[in-house]
Image (cartoon, rainbow, N blue to C red):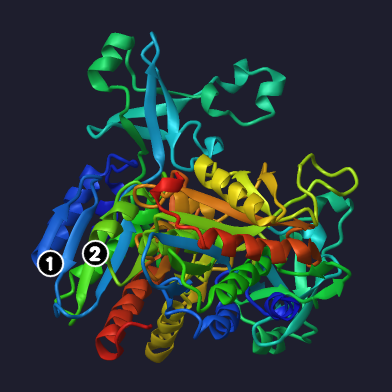
């Protein structure tokens, strides 16, 4: 799991540029599923055919990043955000572009740091002038943070745990299930552009037309000093989502998930995320409506280059998915 | 002149019938089928090879404006914005109310009667009203009714050497680009689904249902887009500049353009020597934001004509950008005929 997670978090994949992540996952799942396809928006859909209800399980591949909007005559690069980025978090960070070009963030002179906005910041790629800058980057290029994953005890500190942790969970679950008979048809969807408004999951769910849907993503915690109140802690197990900004999970689905976890002795916590959404939102509103649930990996410092999660929670999230998919998920559970 | 006729037409979101009528009349002789759907979208199809791809081209007919919400005893009208209207630009403007174009003026308390603190800040919508010259409510009700759309009374004019001013270039200039493409004698060997959409300014609503119905293989939306190449704006915040060619979008708040479509647009522009620029901001949204998420997903792009003072009573475009947008799109359609879709 560590090797897989390291490979996934360190790869380049901001929203709209998920290609490298897609290729890593394709390599991992090819041969253990019946079909792997990519749709018009770039979602990777890994299908396990067979009998039984159609189950969609989704994890988004994309990470937050920045997009080049302007290159000035001195070679400094102006940018905008791809997904939720705080300007304060950028100071001192490095950004990398698809071609390997590295840059650091700078800012205009400010009388008060409170006035810091993305439009007052720039990326310095060390170019001497506009022409040499344009050799390295172009308007529209998307960059990602540049950080190595570090494992320390049970914990991992890395960029993009949101949501490569979820991708790793799905890949691990598919591997565990490989060769085993299960009473469901599984459509594992690695989605695009979640960070820009849950976009990939919407079109994928329309295509899959599932009977029941699940997403796996990261969620916040309330276990750090003076943290916002939230009954989720690192290391206490994956969460079974009750609510976030875009979904109230199906009550029977989440109850069933908890029953399965109890039966298998997998630790879990219930999650209410006050602000933020996941792919479960568009999935449950697809076509005539899809009963849906979600599993999350408790994660601190989400949307920074140094997110932190507990490896046991990630392992247990994969176990919980395996246990759920081994049950026949037909209307009887609802 | 099509651009003049279109910009002067009445077409607040949801009340696009006049614009739809003009466009239907213009493009019908060149299309195989022209119809209107339940939300008022005008769908004009130029059929090609049945086995060939279907390419949807969209431009929205609606404009931002106001709507009559209350008639005072005095006969003046209270209103609310439809779409993104800056209330600070409204006072003292001439308007037309309803499709019968009842003339009116957006009035406010005169400066002599304002308190000091009132004079220091711009009027908000609640402080404004429309005076249509009615002496009381009865007289006003004979002329207008609640729900009537309100447009700015702005005439189209050519100004400078190459520029034009008028209202609603967002998105009548896009409608004109699409109409001109449909009105070309040329037929392509694939099907073009021209859609003049409704209700873009209130959330891309027409485009969403039209693309659900048409199931295209790809889509391009034509827009009038923000140009802030004016004093007081730093050059990295211009978004686009007038006269540098049509603008291509990598990403805005509503979508990330399919990179293969953007690349093809750049290739054909470079090959034909057609100027273009990249839109250098990621704010705002277009019909493409709705279209690309329909059904199983539809690869989409946006081609825009830079427009200064957008969403105000009068905006300015450069006609070269408009003409080059048409040239670029014609070359793009030719490239699909020659090389197939860009993916």
Q: Is residue B246 left or right of residue A177?
A: left
Identify the residue shown where x is 59% and y is 74%.
A176
Estimate the x, y position of residue B173 in percent, counting from the top left.
34, 60
Estimate the x, y position of residue B138 in percent, counting from the top left.
28, 9
The verdict on a common chain for dots 2 and 1 is yes
Establish if B78 lies above or below A33.
above
| Viewer-closest of A6 and B167 | A6
Q: Quadrant of residue B230?
A: bottom right
Establish if A228 lies above or below B112.
below
Identify the residue shown where x is 53% and y is 53%.
A280
**Which is more N-terminal, label 1 or label 2?**
1
The C terminus of chain B lies in quadrant:
bottom left
Q: Is residue B229 visible?
A: no
Identify the residue shown where x is 57% and y is 28%.
B124
* Mark 2 vs 1: CB contact within 8 A: yes
Q: Is residue A83 left or right of residue B166?
A: right
Q: Quadrant of residue A249?
A: top right
| Viewer-closest of A19 and B102 | A19
The mark found on residue B31 in the picture is: 1
Where does label 2 land, which residue? B194
Estimate the x, y position of residue B81 in percent, counting from the top left.
45, 34
Within 10 Å of the Cα at label 1, are there few (<14), some (14-19), or many (20+) other Cα atoms?
many
Measure the C-alpha gap from mark 2 to mark 1: 9 Å
Estimate the x, y position of residue B140 in percent, counting from the top left.
30, 16
Identify the residue shown where x is 60% and y is 63%.
B238
| Viewer-closest of B167 and A47 | A47
The mark found on residue B224 in the picture is: none
């Amino acid at each position: 799991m560590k090797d897989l997670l390291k490979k996934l978090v360190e790869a380049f994949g901001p929203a709209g540029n998920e290609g490298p992540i897609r290729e890593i996952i394709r390599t991992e799942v090819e041969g253990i599923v019946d079909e792997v396809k990519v749709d018009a928006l770039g979602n990777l859909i890994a299908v396990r055919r067979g009998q039984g209800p159609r189950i969609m399980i989704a994890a988004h591949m994309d990470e937050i990043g920045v997009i080049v909007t302007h290159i000035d005559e001195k070679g400094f690069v102006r940018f905008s955000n791809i997904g939720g980025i705080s300007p304060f978090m950028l100071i001192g960070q490095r950004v990398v572009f698809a071609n390997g070009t590295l840059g650091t963030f700078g800012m205009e002179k400010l009388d008060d740091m409170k006035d810091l906005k993305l439009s007052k910041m720039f990326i310095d790629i060390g170019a001497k002038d506009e022409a040499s800058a344009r050799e390295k980057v172009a308007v529209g290029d998307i960059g990602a943070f540049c950080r190595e994953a570090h494992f320390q005890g049970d914990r991992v500190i890395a960029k993009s745990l949101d949501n490569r942790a979820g991708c790793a969970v799905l890949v691990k679950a598919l591997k565990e299930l490989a060769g085993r008979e299960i009473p469901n048809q599984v459509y594992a969807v690695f989605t695009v552009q979640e960070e820009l408004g849950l976009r990939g999951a919407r079109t994928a769910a329309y295509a899959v037309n599932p009977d029941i849907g699940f997403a796996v993503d990261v969620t916040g915690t309330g276990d750090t000093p003076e943290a916002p109140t939230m009954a989720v802690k690192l290391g206490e197990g994956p969460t079974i989502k009750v609510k976030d900004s875009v979904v109230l999970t199906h009550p029977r689905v989440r109850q069933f998930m908890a029953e399965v976890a109890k039966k298998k002795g997998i630790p879990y916590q219930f999650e209410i995320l006050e602000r933020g959404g996941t792919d479960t939102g568009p999935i449950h509103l697809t076509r005539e409506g899809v009963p849906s649930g979600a599993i999350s990996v408790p994660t601190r410092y989400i949307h920074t280059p140094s997110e932190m999660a507990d490896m046991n929670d990630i392992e247990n999230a994969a176990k919980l998915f395996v246990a759920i998919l081994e049950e026949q998920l037909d209307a009887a559970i609802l | 002149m099509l651009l003049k006729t279109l910009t002067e037409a009445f077409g607040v979101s949801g009340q696009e019938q006049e614009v739809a009528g003009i466009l239907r009349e213009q493009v019908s002789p060149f299309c195989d089928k022209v119809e209107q759907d339940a939300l008022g979208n005008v769908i004009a199809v130029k059929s090609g090879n049945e086995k060939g791809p279907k390419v949807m081209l969209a431009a929205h007919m609606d404009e931002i404006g106001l709507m009559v919400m209350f008639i005072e005893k005095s006969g003046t009208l209270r209103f609310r914005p439809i779409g993104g209207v800056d209330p600070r630009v409204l006072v003292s403007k001439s308007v037309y109310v309803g499709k019968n174009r009842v003339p009116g003026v957006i009035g406010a308390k005169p400066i002599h009667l304002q308190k000091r603190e009132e004079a220091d800040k711009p009027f908000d919508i609640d402080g404004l009203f429309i005076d249509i010259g009615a002496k009381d409510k009865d007289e006003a009700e004979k002329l207008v009714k609640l729900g009537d759309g309100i447009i700015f009374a702005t005439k189209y004019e050519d100004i400078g050497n190459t520029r034009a001013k008028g209202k609603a270039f967002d998105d009548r200039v896009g409608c004109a680009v699409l109409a001109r493409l449909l009105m070309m004698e040329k037929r392509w060997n694939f099907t073009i689904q021209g859609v003049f959409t409704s209700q873009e300014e209130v959330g891309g609503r027409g485009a969403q249902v039209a693309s659900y119905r048409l199931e295209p293989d790809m889509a391009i939306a034509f827009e009038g887009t923000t140009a802030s190449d004016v004093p007081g704006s730093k050059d990295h915040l211009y978004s686009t500049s007038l006269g540098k060619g049509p603008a291509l979008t990598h990403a805005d708040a509503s979508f990330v353009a399919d990179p293969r479509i953007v690349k093809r647009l750049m290739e054909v522009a470079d090959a034909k020597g057609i100027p273009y620029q990249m839109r250098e901001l990621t704010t705002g949204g277009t019909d493409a934001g709705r279209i690309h998420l329909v059904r199983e997903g539809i690869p989409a792009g946006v081609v825009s004509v830079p427009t200064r003072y957008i969403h105000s009573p009068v905006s300015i475009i450069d006609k070269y950008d408009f003409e080059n947008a048409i040239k670029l799109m014609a070359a793009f359609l030719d490239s699909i005929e020659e090389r197939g879709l860009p993916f």
